[in-house]
Amino acid sequence: MKTTPQTLDEFMAVALAMENEAVDRYTDFADMMETHNNGDVAKLFRTMAGYEAKHAQHIMAQMGWKTAPAVPRELVCWPGYESPEAAAVDEVHYLMQPWHALQLALAAEQRAEAFFGQLAAMTTNEAVRAAALELQAEEAEHVGLVKAWMAKVPQPDSDWSDDPDPPRYID
Amino acid sequence: MNDTTLEARFSAADYKSDYKPIWCPGCGDYTVLSSLTKALATIQRPPHEVAVVSGIGCSSRIPAYTTCYGFHGVHGRALAAGTGLKVARPDLTVVVTGGDGDGYSIGGNHFMHACRRNVDMTYIVMDNHVYGMTKGQASPTTEPDWDNKLAPGGTGIRAFHPLVIALASGANFIGRGFSGDPNGTAAIIAQAIRHPGFSFVEILSPCVTFRPEQKGWKEIVRAAPVEPTDDPALAARRIMTDDGFNIGVLYAGHRNPYPARVGSATRSVADLEREFEL
């Protein structure tokens, strides 16, 4: 992010934009996986989208907002271009397994945790710092939850991406 | 008007249709679609006042994924269809979309002349340096040494430089985006739509299936370290010497758009027939 939010309202608007971008990304992933008949992973991404939507709703309720406030563009120019909590768009594969999806989610939650931590360290506004630390703690909790979830799903075999009828026939 | 103070009637979701894209998971075109809908939400034109026109190819599926009017046209002829539409209906916002094969090879001639005519529309090219839909043939922007079974050792042919061609041919706005920067790309598209005349936006959009190495683009793209210029000579020097990974608005000129007649859509058939009378 190139500019730091100066007020609590600005900060929460940025946090909301971040959650909403994560919802959009997980929803896109769920749609991709449904289109490619990968039902288990589609369901998982849909669940993740649901969680992020709840976080967004929580922020809206906390701030008493009826609609998402407009966020100046300079506040949503994320480090590395993508919103920290949006899973990497080019890391999905049509044969991916739930473990891979959780791995993406884990990386996203870790980026969000680091993002809020960095913001708390940088801001000079006490209200923003307190809110950033609170959200950092929430993201740390999500990191723990995703790790626990990963422990419950099987790790993929090394040949998980082998496809006897691949779309790419030129190799 | 300031984007942040505009009362938003339409959100990005209002421009997305219920059809789910069938691109490969991981394809850059997903985020280009997202950038396009965000840009349209910035512009705040109702979906029925926007037409998205395309040719053929993976990226040319985009009109169906929007709620705008759409025309999925003939290979390479998206700009011809878009030009006709804009001239007939100057009241519409016309966005033409496609890929590098469709736009620079099959439609290469239309590309140059659309730039030259400078009709007020926006052309978005999702460039992945390959023909993806037909399974991985080299396209006009493919690097000459891209080695694969369909072109062993590479084609050995110098890659087309679309931004230079656009500038030399008269495009009034030239920008480059990256699919991995959805918000930045949305801002460029919104600017392109607002800029009068023919606006050309090339978007680097990796093909994860046939060019998986393009995932590395996110490590090398960078914001252009210069402000946009309205000086074509300066723009030419910059574009000719860059490595193809500077993103942002690179040129914004002042040419007057092709003077499409406002109100032509309300003319009757009889009016048109009279114009053809001998």
Image: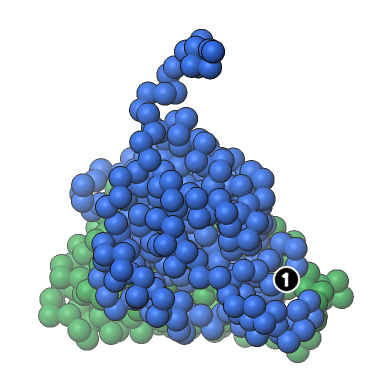
Chain colours: A green, B blue
Which chain does tag 1 point to? B
**In this view, B49 is above or below B40:** above
Quick check: A91 left or right of A93? Answer: left
Could you say which is closer to the camera, residue B86 or residue A73?
A: B86
Could you say which is closer to the camera, residue B243 or residue A44?
A: B243
Quick check: B162 left or right of B258? Answer: right
Q: Quadrant of the C terminus of chain B?
A: top right
Q: In this figure, which residue is indicated by the disc labeled 1?
A: B136
Residue occupying the point 67% across, 50% down: B75
**In this view, A34 is above or below B77:** below
Residue occupying the point 27% across, 75% down: B226
Residue occupying the point 26% across, 64% down: B231
Residue at the far right: name it: A164
Could you say which is closer to the camera, residue B27 or residue A120?
A: B27
Residue A42: x %, y % from top left? 65, 63
Residue B219: x %, y % from top left? 47, 84
Can residue B217 be seen? yes
Can residue A17 be seen? no
Residue type indicated by callout 1:
Gly
Residue A9: x %, y % from top left? 20, 62
Residues packed near mark 1 inside 10 Å, few (<14), some (14 to 19) or many (20 plus): many
